[in-house]
Image: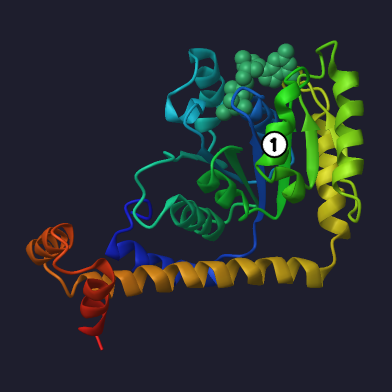
Amino acid sequence: MVEDNSHEAQRLLKELFPHTGKSTIVGITGSPGSGKSTLVDKLIGYLRSDHKEIGIIAVDPSSPFSGGAILGDRIRMMRHSADPGIFIRSMATRGHLGGLAKASGEAISVLEASGKDIILVETVGVGQDEVEVIKFADLILVVLIPGAGDDIQVFKAGLMEIADIFVLNKADSPEADKMEKQLKAMLDLGLKDRLIPPVIKTVATEGRGIQPLLEEIENILSTRDHEMQAARKKRLISWMLKDIIREKLYKAVSDNVLESEFEDFVEKIYRRETDPYTVADLIVSRSK
Ligand SMILES: Nc1nc2c(ncn2[C@@H]2O[C@H](COP(=O)(O)OP(=O)(O)O)[C@@H](O)[C@H]2O)c(=O)[nH]1
Ligand SMILES: [Mg+2]
């Protein structure tokens, strides 16, 4: 319902809202093929043995959850899908009324209200929409791999600034150490005035480095001061509120004009009998 942006969903979200805000939301982003899903799979294993309830949202066109990936991945995830302590939801990148960020934010709310301790959000680190989604997270893991020298893309996409931890996955590659040095050097240069985020090496396929990664996540979350955490949550609320207002205004205003009339306006604008600004003013003024 939430993904369809239905009217009923809004009523439910109102009721759910008091029960949200208690889960830890961990975002996992990086290029396709960097091993995000494999990492998520291994993280699930550790967290479940600690009796944590987990929600997973995968916003990834190539995600095993959305059926775009190889069979092996799907079989791996299936063993988790039978576990009642886990809820996995895949979301398409396109086709959400009100936008991907809104839809996934609301899906996170539903999982929070359901009492999940931890929500993992996997998303590819390309495209503005995907980067927006990751801002819901309390903590962001940026997954890099050795050899893909063009991991500079990550820096271009603005992920360097938002990373709390860099996960250097596929550390079984002979280039891993070199990559680690390069990454640290780049971070030193790029983040002069900021604390350099930790770099954790993992081999997701073998489960290596997962324990240290979880310890680092714990460590960051526990040392973060309350004010900072609150400021982060408030920023999200203000962002969410603006989104909702924008959508409601748009809806209220677009109800003022019939589809056929709208088409007529387009026709007139096309013939240069009027201009889009005048028409927009006219339509908006009807709701006053
Ligand atoms: N050698 C090696 N391969 C890995 C590692 N982690 C993941 N892979 C493989 O990389 C491929 C892509 O992994 P996947 O988790 O689907 O990546 P995603 O697109 O980022 O979700 C799969 O074939 C994995 O088995 C690793 O640490 N070492
Ligand atoms: Mg994936």
Quadrant where the image shows the N terminus: bottom left
Examine the rendered structure and indicate whether residue 133 appears above or below residue 230: above
Q: Position of residue 165 (x, y in %)?
A: 80, 42
Residues 136 and 208: in front is: 136
Q: Residue at x 66, y 40 (%)?
A: 28
Q: Residue at x 21, y 72 (%)?
A: 279
Q: Position of residue 260 (x, y in %)?
A: 7, 62
Relative side of 156 to 255, left or right: right
Residues 42 and 249: in front is: 249
Kind of residue sitting beneath label 1: Val
Quarter of the image where one finds residue 122: top right
Type of colouring = rainbow
Count of labels in the image: 1
Relative side of 9 to 276, left or right: right
Kindly give the residue lying farthest to the bottom in the view shown: 288
The crowd level at tag 1 (other Cα within 10 Å; few <14, some 14-19, many 20+) is some
Quadrant where the image shows the C terminus: bottom left
Q: Judging from the image, what secondary structure is the residue with disc 1 in?
A: helix
Image quadrant, ligand 2: top right
Q: Residue at x 56, y 50 (%)?
A: 133
Q: Position of residue 174 (x, y in %)?
A: 85, 10
On the image, numbered disc 1 is attached to which residue? Answer: 154
Q: Residue at x 59, y 26 (%)?
A: 32
Quarter of the image where one finds residue 40: top right
Q: Is residue 235 visible to the viewer in this orientation of the structure?
A: yes
Quarter of the image where one finds residue 273: bottom left
Relative side of 119 to 218, left or right: left
Q: Is residue 212 visible to the viewer in this orientation of the structure?
A: no
Examine the rendered structure and indicate whether residue 63 appears above or below residue 186: above
Residues 154 and 280: in front is: 280
Q: Position of residue 235 (x, y in %)?
A: 64, 69
